[in-house]
Image (tube, helix red, strand yellow):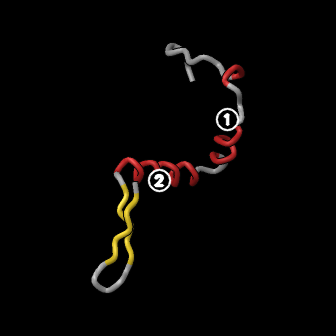
């Protein structure tokens, strides 16, 4: 949720929920990593059937 705020000088500010702020910060962080945007976009286009199952004991 976002709410606009105007101070006594008529200047605007925006109040957002902490969860939304954290999501924005995470997005900005990930976008700073070279190639990450393209990697994430490619991953979003991968069907679930083509994804591998996570194995907790598997080494990365």
Nearer the observer, 16 or 38:
16
Which quarter of the image is occupied by the N terminus? Answer: bottom left
Q: Find residue 6 and report its image quarter.
A: bottom left
Pointer 1: what residue?
43
Q: Identify which residue is drawn at 55% across, 48% down.
A: 30
Q: Residue furthest bottom?
A: 9
Establish if 12 lies above or below 9: above
For marks 2 and 1 on the same chain, the one whose residue lies earlier in the sequence: 2
Establish if 16 lies above or below 5: above
SS type, badge 2: helix
Asked if residue 52 lies left or right of residue 7, the reply is right
Find residue 35 and report its horizontal and vertical position in percent: 67, 47
Find residue 19 and report its horizontal and vertical position in percent: 38, 47
Q: Identify which residue is drawn at 51% across, 13% down.
A: 57
Q: Identify which residue is drawn at 57% across, 24% down.
A: 60
Q: Residue furthest left?
A: 8
User: Label 1 neighbourhood size at 10 Å, few (<14), some (14-19), many (20+)?
Assistant: few
Find residue 29 and report its horizontal and vertical position in percent: 51, 51
Q: Find residue 14 and report its image quarter.
A: bottom left
Mark number for residue 24?
2
Q: Identify which residue is drawn at 66% across, 23% down.
A: 48
């Amino acid at each position: 949720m976002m709410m606009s705020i105007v101070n006594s000088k008529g200047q605007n500010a925006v109040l957002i929920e902490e969860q939304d702020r954290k999501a924005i910060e995470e997005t900005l962080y990930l976008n700073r990593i070279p190639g990450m945007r393209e990697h994430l976009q490619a991953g979003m286009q991968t069907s679930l059937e083509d994804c591998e199952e996570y194995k907790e004991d598997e080494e990365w």
